[in-house]
Amino acid sequence: MCGTCGCSEESGGTRITMLREDGEADHGHPHPHPHEHPHPHPHPGVQPDVAVETVTIEQRVLAKNDLLAERNRTWMTERGVVAVNMMSSPGADKTTLLERTITDLAGRRPVAVVEGDQETRLDADRIGRTGCAVVQVNTGAGCHLDAEMMRDALTALSPAQGSPLMVENVGNLVRPALFDLGERAKAVIISVTEGTDKPLKYPYMFAAADLILINKADLLPYVDFDVEQCTRHARSVNPDVRVLTVSATTGEGLSHWYDWLAAQR
Ligand code: MG
């Protein structure tokens, strides 16, 4: 098990579940590849040559991922599919934001969704109730989506020409930052119930972001969260990043999010 994120390669294995129009799950083809999880950090007691070897494996894993991500990007570009990789801690209300986004954009373009979670199809079921096409990827013991999972999800989903494709990554701020899926843009969501210092604690994630959404703005009167300070922290690791304050519950600020989504086309 990895000491940085608890991600393990020993158990699990990825499952892709396509939600059919009748609401039933279609598990499609099995996905037998083992989750590759190298350890980029030397562990106590590990010999230096072993540490070097694990770093090399990590580089190979990321290089293979980047290659597959480029293929995904080409595949989506040819079909006019614009994917946004949405990443956050658990509980930032990504799924609620997605539900609201799909509902508010209904009638403009059919949105397709890839849902990533370690287990369950709860979020895909929620998204499926909005009527949009959705596929659930369960990563088992893995803590992030990768380009191979994205490729399989795209195959299962077969998004319509010109679809916006929303990808809800597995909730954590560490590994998802490293794995390109072939998306057009990365949006990082932080909620006002979290610490203002998250951008400093997880700089790789916030540096990778094209957009930062500060969600649950409706709760600002009740919590100790400084939007200006969080924005300053975010810009200290990503100087030009766009930051929007929104509430998926009340709709506050969402028009700017929709404008940003439209501009990704
Ligand atoms: Mg969710």
Image (spheres, rainbow, N blue to C red):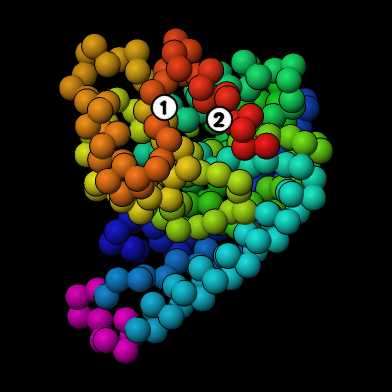
Label 1, secondary structure: give it: strand
Residue 171 placement (x, y as % from top left): 42, 41
Residue 136 placement (x, y as % from top left): 62, 40
Does 30 sit above or below residue 135?
Answer: below
- What's under tag 1, amino acid-wise? Leu
Beta carbon of the mark 1 residue lies under 8 A of ligand 1: no
Give the magenta-colored segment's residue range: 43-51
Q: Give me the residue at 21% from left, 19% from top.
A: 223
Residue 197 placement (x, y as % from top left): 22, 39
Residue where numbered disc 1 is placed? 244
For the question of whether residue 125 can be seen, the reply is: no
Residue where numbered disc 2 is placed? 260
Q: Residue 44 vs residue 82: left or right?
A: left
**Residue 49 drawn in magenta:** yes
Beta carbon of the mark 2 residue lies under 8 A of ligand 1: no
Choose between 9 and 188: the one closer to the eye: 188
Asked if the residue under mark 2 is in contact with the one under mark 1, i.e. CB atoms within 8 Å, the reply is yes
